[in-house]
Image (spheres, helix red, strand yellow):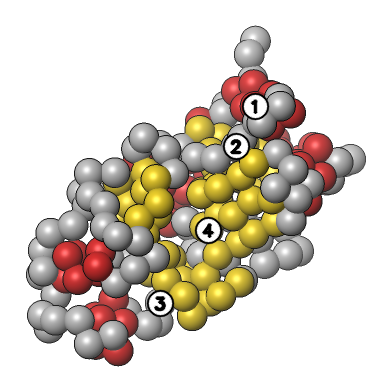
């Protein structure tokens, strides 16, 4: 039987290997940390150069999207389209990152994969407020990052993360509470068995 997680891991150990565009799924090893049951979309990773990603399953209740647009003085009010806000990670929590489908790009956009783009400028928020912009989008406040070799150590030596393929449903879905289980299901892992194995390690 093939395990997708293993084949995804192989990407990172090849020369110039990258995990960019994959999901990091927290294991029970992180249960007593702020990353408990987190799902992180990896926006950038290069072997030997570190990594950066966004937590995509932590809803941020405040500020609301309308409140944020008001603070940024972006019309119209109310906006013609809304986005949910995520707590994207513990670093630069006041800075917003929009992860979105690649059918839209602006001056501050950085392609992540053929299907996803990251934008940190206000252009995309203006477009969305006016009812346009990318088909799918997620606004994250803050991000997570790792120094060179740190993420690989967490994966290989500490069993802190599993790797899963990213899908539109998981990354841009609105049911944040379901994303952790959905990501595990995509690599054929039952969260109950995962917890049991960790408890008896």
Q: CA distance from mark 3 to mark 1?
A: 36 Å
Q: CA distance from mark 2 to mark 4?
A: 15 Å
Residue 162's place in the image compared with 137, above or below, is above
> N-terminal of the two: label 1 or label 4?
1
Q: CA distance from mark 3 to mark 4?
A: 15 Å
Q: Residue visible at 65% across and 31% down?
A: 17
**Circle nearer the viewer, 3 or 1:** 1
100 lies left or right of 7: left
On residue 11, the disc is 1
The residue singled out by tag 3 in the image is 61
Q: Residue visible at 30% across and 60% down?
A: 107
Numbered disc 3: secondary structure? loop
Image quadrant containing the N terminus: top right
Q: Position of residue 50 (x, y in %)?
A: 69, 50
> N-terminal of the two: label 2 or label 3?
2
The residue singled out by tag 2 in the image is 19
- The crowding category of the residue bearing disc 2, from other C-alpha atoms within 10 Å (few below 14, some 14 to 19, many at least 20), is many
Q: CA distance from mark 2 to mark 1?
A: 7 Å
Q: Quadrant of residue 23?
A: top right
> N-terminal of the two: label 2 or label 1?
1
50 lies left or right of 87: right
C-beta proximity under 8 Å, tags 2 and 3: no
Instruction: Specify the farthest residue to the right.
Output: 201
């Amino acid at each position: 039987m093939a395990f997708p997680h293993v084949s995804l891991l192989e990407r990172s150990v090849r020369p110039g290997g990258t995990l960019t565009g994959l999901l990091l799924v927290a294991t029970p090893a992180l249960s007593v940390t702020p990353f408990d049951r987190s799902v992180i979309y990896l926006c950038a990773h290069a072997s030997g150069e570190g990594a950066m990603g966004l937590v995509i399953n932590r809803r941020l209740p405040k500020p609301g999207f309308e409140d944020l647009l008001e603070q940024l003085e972006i019309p119209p009010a109310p906006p013609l389209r809304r986005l949910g806000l995520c707590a994207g990670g513990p670093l630069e929590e006041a800075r917003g990152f929009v992860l979105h489908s690649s059918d839209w790009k602006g001056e501050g956009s950085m392609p992540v994969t053929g299907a996803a783009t990251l934008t940190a400028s206000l252009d995309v928020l203006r477009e969305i407020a006016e009812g346009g912009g990318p088909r799918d989008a997620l606004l994250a406040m803050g991000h997570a990052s790792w120094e060179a070799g740190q993420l690989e150590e967490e994966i290989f030596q500490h069993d802190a993360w599993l790797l899963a393929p990213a899908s539109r449903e998981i990354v841009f879905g609105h049911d944040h509470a379901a994303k952790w289980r959905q990501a595990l299901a995509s690599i054929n892992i039952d969260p109950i068995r995962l917890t049991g194995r960790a408890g008896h390690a």
